Amino acid sequence: MRSFCTFKLNEISFGIDVLKVLGILNTAEIVRVPLANRTVKGLIQYRGQIITVIDLRRKFELEDRKKGENFLHTIVKTKKGVVSLLVDEVGDIEEITQSTRVEMSKSVQGVDSFFISHTYKFDEYTLLILDVEKIIEVKSEKLV
């Protein structure tokens, strides 16, 4: 049995291994970084550290938030350091068994399966488990 911190993004349910989640922040002043990758929203201070903020809506090429729409910072640890992932809302901690795991296709609910490590199916919804190491990778963008 594994435990995952769940959250929603554009009405899609996601999970991250609970052991990788350091905390959740309601607010933090985001400092913009000129010329940064479009998925990098900026930098915040978290417990004395300056960490990168990644906008998951942009990372997954979903619709941008409307001005004034709320978001939360999910603070996670990766092999390369601590980052903040912007999410719409945080859910519960789900304890999941292998029996609910399903095979995934190339794209799951519009999200590239490159970022997804597992998919779990429940009666009401599908939970996409993120691979946080792949989230922080910057795919090389082709310049025209």
Image (cartoon, helix red, strand yellow):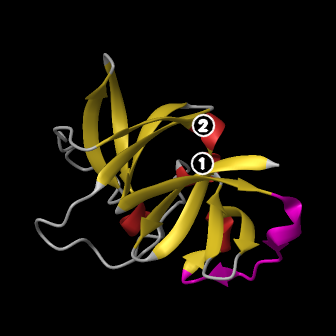
Viewer-side residue, 113 vs 137 = 113
Asked if marks 1 and 2 touch (Cβ < 8 Å), the reply is: yes
Residue 92 seen anywhere in this rendered image of the structure: yes
**Label number found at residue 132:** 1
Q: Is residue 93 left or right of residue 83?
A: right
**Label number found at residue 108:** none
| Dot 1 crowding, Cα within 10 Å, few <14, some 14–19, many 20+ | many
Q: Is residue 92 above or below residue 107?
A: above
Q: Amino acid at mark 1?
A: Val
Q: Outermost residue, left direction? A: 68
Q: Report x, y in % for residue 113.
A: 67, 72
Q: Amino acid at mark 2?
A: Lys
The residue under the point 57% across, 83% down is 109
Q: CA distance from mark 1 to mark 2?
A: 9 Å
Residue 36 seen anywhere in this rendered image of the structure: no
Whether 89 is among the magenta residues is: no
In the rendered image, which quarter is residue 25 located in?
top left
Whether 108 is among the magenta residues is: yes
Quadrant where the C terminus sits is bottom left
Viewer-side residue, 55 vs 120 = 120
Q: Report x, y in % for residue 123.
A: 68, 82
Q: Report x, y in % for residue 73.
A: 34, 46
Residue placed under numbered mark 2 in the picture: 20
Q: Outermost residue, right direction? A: 99
Q: Is residue 91 above or below residue 12?
A: above
The residue under the point 77% across, 48% down is 2
Write down the region rendered in magenta.
97-110
| Dot 2 crowding, Cα within 10 Å, few <14, some 14–19, many 20+ | some
